[in-house]
Image (cartoon, grey):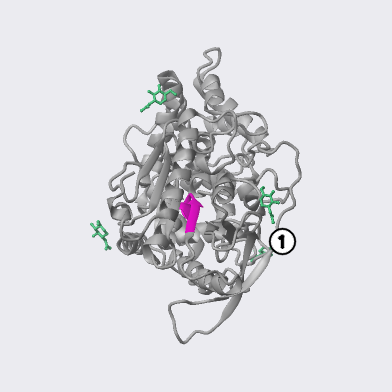
Amino acid sequence: MIDSMFTPLLLICLVCALCDARRNHLLSQKHGKLGEPFGHVLLTLPPDQWFDQKLDHFNVEDTRIWKQRFFVNSTWFKHGGPVFLMIGGEGEASPEWMVQGAWLHYAQHYNALAVQVEHRFYGKSRPLPDLSLSSLQYLSSEQALADLAHFITFMSTEYQLPPHTKWIAFGGSYPGSLAAWLRYKYPHLVHGAMSASGPLRAVLDFAEYFKVVTDALATVSPKCVTAVAEATSVISEMLTSTSDAEYLTQQFRLCKSLDISNSKDVASFVESLADNFARVVQYNMPGSLGVTIDTLCEIMMDETEEPVERYASVNDLILRDSDEPCLAYVYEEMVLDLRNESWESEMANGGRQWIYQTCAEFGFYPTSDQSRHIFGQEFPLEFFTDMCRDIYGPKFSRELLISNINRTNTNYGALELEVTRVVFVQGSIDPWHALGIYQTRSDQAPAIYINGTSHCANMYPPSPDDLPDLVKARHRINYLIGKWLKADYHHDSHDNN
Ligand SMILES: *[C@@H]1O[C@H](CO)[C@@H](O)[C@H](O)[C@H]1NC(C)=O
Ligand SMILES: *[C@@H]1O[C@H](CO)[C@@H](O)[C@H](O)[C@H]1NC(C)=O
Ligand SMILES: *[C@@H]1O[C@H](CO)[C@@H](O)[C@H](O)[C@H]1NC(C)=O
Ligand SMILES: *[C@@H]1O[C@H](CO)[C@@H](O)[C@H](O)[C@H]1NC(C)=O
């Protein structure tokens, strides 16, 4: 259910959710289907490895430790070579990353040791026995960065890496932000970073999200945008009548009858329909049914049906693509699931933890508050801020959220982040670029803005269908890494590019 309601909240770069038979709702449904980059070649995945990590890096009296998971691919490593660190994010770390992805081409080129560390509280990296609030207080980006710093010192000893071994961090989406922040916070440990699709600015009301989704539809045709606006405006009117609500229940295959007196359910329903478009735009890659932005717009522009019927056809298609019998949207059920503190709960696959991080650090709520929003006005900011309170308790007031977000931006500098040897990579149709750096402001930390790609596109293995801008971006990243690895610390400030 979280999948249908909160996809825009989940930034995950789905490198190979498909190749991976593990059942993981958050990762595998709807957009996790990337096709098979290596055809049907079966690659042996590296085994899990574990090391002792501190629970609390910011309390000297707390000596508790836990086992953090990591993976290694040393196939191309030559002694004295660099180490490439793939940063895990808001879901289980996939060992698929260890055998494919653009970063491994760079690793091969530069004889790097390739390692990936799973983020604390996700996947199998479980610092504490449950996900209660008292456990989740140790889930934060700051603790995660300190984990990585500690990991680097651990590996240096474990692999007897020579002093001054150069570490390059890689990450996409939330880990894209972490990669840049890691270089910022621990410059003596991390030599450079490739930060893909990173939302660097925390913001409570991320109304721009749906603006970028709308812009992406407009690139197909302005008629597509108009048709969506027409459909949602008719739906808004229907939401005032009980008999029309019955029609909506049928038409949109709702798992339960829509009760229009329940404003949370109405918000969640309208948000789920907007999300049908958002997920396709965010991961603009054909799923099992080959659904792309073009497919959605083709349906929306088919004038043989009424706009609401076309909007319902899009919903049908997305439900089929994700093998779901009906649209789950009931707010109370979702909140109850997300309150579950057990690692056995389905929401422990990332939903409970990531929504906690949005309430405690980032916000990022894709609201309908923007003027000229085409997906219906029914899911304003309060819908999301109330959700924090409903899931994690009354302390999570709107005031607390605002101060949490300010704290994050003060801590990392938001878009004023000052770093060197970081390349920021963003895609023009990825809604998340709106919170990241996509224009070069300093030669020391260039931005690459890829025309026509979406979330984390540059991290996937190269494919013959790649847009020319994407191909160029991967080459430029390779070039920059080479430059950094050669860089003499004292001279590289004169070196532009
Ligand atoms: C490292 O990745 C390459 C490329 O996919 C793969 O051929 C190799 O088997 C991997 N090595 C290990 C130890 O997993
Ligand atoms: C949490 O989820 C687990 C696994 O689905 C379930 O067994 C347990 O009853 C749930 N706990 C609560 C309090 O709902
Ligand atoms: C948060 O930051 C905004 C803008 O920087 C400021 O207007 C607001 O007063 C701050 N709020 C709190 C609670 O610190
Ligand atoms: C982006 O690509 C499209 C076609 O793919 C082209 O029409 C457009 O001019 C390009 N925009 C920029 C800024 O290069």
Q: Nearer the viewer, residue 406 or 338?
A: 406
- Residue 420 colored magenta? no
Q: Is residue 39 above or below residue 424?
A: above
Q: What segment carries the magenta color?
A: 168-176
Identify the residue under disc 1.
47
Residue 323 is situated, as x and y percent measured from the top left of the image, at: 69, 38
Q: Looking at the rendering, in which quadrant would you find the C terminus?
A: top left
66 or 331: which is nearer to us?
Answer: 66
Measuring 31% from the left and 51% from the top, which residue is drawn there?
A: 415
Quadrant location of residue 212?
top left
Mark 1 Cβ and ligand 1 under 8 Å apart: no
Q: Residue at x 52, y 47 (%)?
A: 6
| Residue type at tag 1 | Pro
Q: Position of residue 438 (x, y in %)?
A: 35, 42
Rendered location of residue 94, percent (x, y): 64, 54
x then y, percent, for residue 390: 48, 60
Q: Is residue 353 left or right of residue 74?
A: left
Q: Tell me if I can see residue 260 in this picture.
A: no
User: Residue 190 versus residue 361: which sits nearer the camera?
Assistant: 190
Q: Residue at x 52, y 49 (%)?
A: 10
